[in-house]
Image: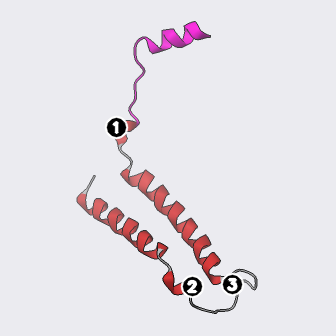
Amino acid sequence: MKPTRTIALTLLVLAVYVLHQDFWNWTKAEPLVFGFLPVGLAYHAGYSVLAAVTMAVLVKFAWPKHLEDVKPEAGARKESEEEA
């Protein structure tokens, strides 16, 4: 993997980690988001989406390709046919 890509993905993960520590939302007495959702809960809903997108980006750009190159063993097909 390219060093630039590694640095960018590392910074993305660190940013998501820092955003998870949302201490600034718990002392505020702000109005509800959309009229019914507490600020802390709305923040965590958005954070969950961000975490899912981050994981998708990591799988797309940092997944080890050699793990996908699996070739069946010579005897594996015969064993599965015998079981059926």
Q: How far is disc 2 from disc 3 in space, using C-alphas?
A: 14 Å
Q: How far is disc 1 from disc 2 in space, using C-alphas?
A: 44 Å
- The residue shown at (33%, 64%) is 10
58 left or right, relative to 4? right
- The residue shown at (70%, 87%) is 32
In the rendered view, tell whether residue 34 sits above or below residue 68.
below
Select label 1 or label 2 by which is in front. Answer: 2
Identify the mark at residue 33; answer none if there is no mark.
3
Q: Which residues are magenta?
A: 68-84
Residue that badge 2 annotates: 26
Name the kind of residue labelled 1 in the image. His
- The residue shown at (38%, 32%) is 69
* Most distant residue in the left direction: 3
Q: How far is disc 1 from disc 3 in space, using C-alphas?
A: 45 Å
Question: Earlier along the polypeptide chain: callout 1 or callout 3?
Answer: 3
Element at badge 3?
loop
Residues tagged 1 and 3 counted as in contact (Cβ below 8 A): no
In percent of width and height, residue 34 lies at 72, 83
Question: Earlier along the polypeptide chain: callout 1 or callout 2?
Answer: 2
In the rendered view, tell whether residue 55 sits above or below residue 63.
below
Element at badge 1?
helix
